[in-house]
Image (tube, grey):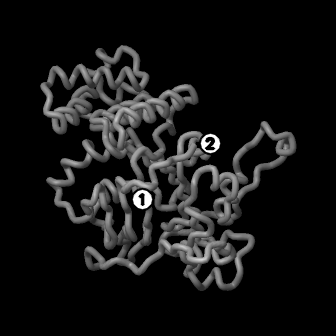
Amino acid sequence: MTNGNTTQQPLLEVRDLRTYFNIEGSWAKAVDGVSFEVYPGEVLGIVGESGSGKSVTALSIMKLIPDPPGRIVGGQILYKGTDLVRLDYTDMYRIRGKEIAMIFQEPMTSLNPVFTIGMQIAEVLQAHEGISPEDARYRAADLLTRVGIPDAEKRLDDYPHQFSGGMRQRVMIAIALACNPSILIADEPTTALDVTIQAQILELMLELKQQRGDAAIILITHNLAVVAEMCHRVIVMYGGKIQEIADVFELFGNPLHPYTKGLLASIPRPEIPEYRGKRLVAIPGNVPSIMNLPKGCKFCTRCSVAIERCFTVEPPLVEITPNHFVRCHLVETTLSTPRILDGQPLQETMSL
């Protein structure tokens, strides 16, 4: 899948984003200097193991970082030229849900247990669309039907505890899609769903994106098969930093970072005869604690090809081939004037 919109102005620009958490007097750098763009009509995938900073990046865009202990300490999040980091609560309220919506990873903690499903969907519609309660209820039922919940009209009066985990996830998707947002951030949107419903939900997300010409999706997932099917570009994160960015075909066909290679090598491939009956390749070790990340490359403690420099010097994120960026000392660029995405840190928005 390719995207020809990267010559347009981006819908969203994340510049040197830094989100830290104060843990017992020390600052944990959950997101540390992340920069990327999202273009009209694009599906941007973000992959990486748990603890890589994917969800914190998404919550930072929505300005939903709990403060304390978390805080956006630096960088910019530009939505159509407006820096969301500097917006107050009222202005951000107008954008959140209407212009930028998010499907959260944990539906059990994202739905209010004391309000009916219908009230929680209608609330979004009435707040941002200004429609009557009757129209909001009708549209809420239609949304539930579209995400695969039977007897939607009756289920509007049920409470979250009366739904299964998968059905609660579908309700969260209905809420996020209610106002047809310009940017949809989907954090593991199909985790609790069976394969058939997964395909239906992903198709629905793409369908609603196409209904709004400038809409885009940021898809956070562990499922690389979904990334290969849906995404135009892919960001690989590890240790709170971007390790590789490339077009989806380029990333799957020519992965350059050792971490990306490890992720792709762990995918089961039963359709290929030489892979049958063999153990999957696993990345050794575990993701290091966010409070004790390596000084140099964040992946150096698990990398089989690391050299001495990797343990002491953080590599920059460099353009290796056109629009293919990699953070690795061992990968050399083929370009005469490569771009480096790790610029000078922007002035901090808040002091630590």
Specify whether 253 is left or right of 240: right
Q: Nearer the viewer, residue 121 or 235?
A: 235
- Residue drawn at 37 percent across, 61 percent down: 13
Quadrant housing the N terminus: top right
Q: Residue 220 carries which label?
A: none
Q: Earlier in the sequence, mark 1 or mark 2?
A: 1
Q: Position of residue 118 (x, y in %)?
A: 25, 26
What residue type is disc 2 on? Answer: Ala
Q: How crowded is mark 2: few (under 14 residues within 10 Å), some or many (20 or more)?
A: few
Q: How far apart are marks 1 and 2 (CA)?
A: 23 Å
Q: In this view, does 341 lie above or below 175?
A: below
The answer to whether any part of residue 275 appears in the image is: yes
Q: Is residue 54 above or below residue 156?
A: below
Q: Where is residue 64 in the image (x, y as percent from the top left)?
A: 30, 55
Specify whether 281 is left or right of 130: right
Residue linked to disc 1: 37
Q: Position of residue 211 (x, y in %)?
A: 36, 32
Residue linked to disc 2: 225
Q: Nearer the viewer, residue 130 or 60?
A: 130
- Residue drawn at 68 percent across, 65 percent down: 258
The answer to whether any part of residue 105 appears in the image is: no
Where disc 2 sits, the SS reads helix
Q: Position of residue 108 (x, y in %)?
A: 38, 39
Where disc 1 sits, the SS reads strand
Q: How crowded is mark 1: few (under 14 residues within 10 Å), some or many (20 or more)?
A: some
- Residue drawn at 20 percent across, 34 percent down: 123
* Residue 196 found in image quarter: top right
Q: In this view, does 278 lie above or below 117?
A: below
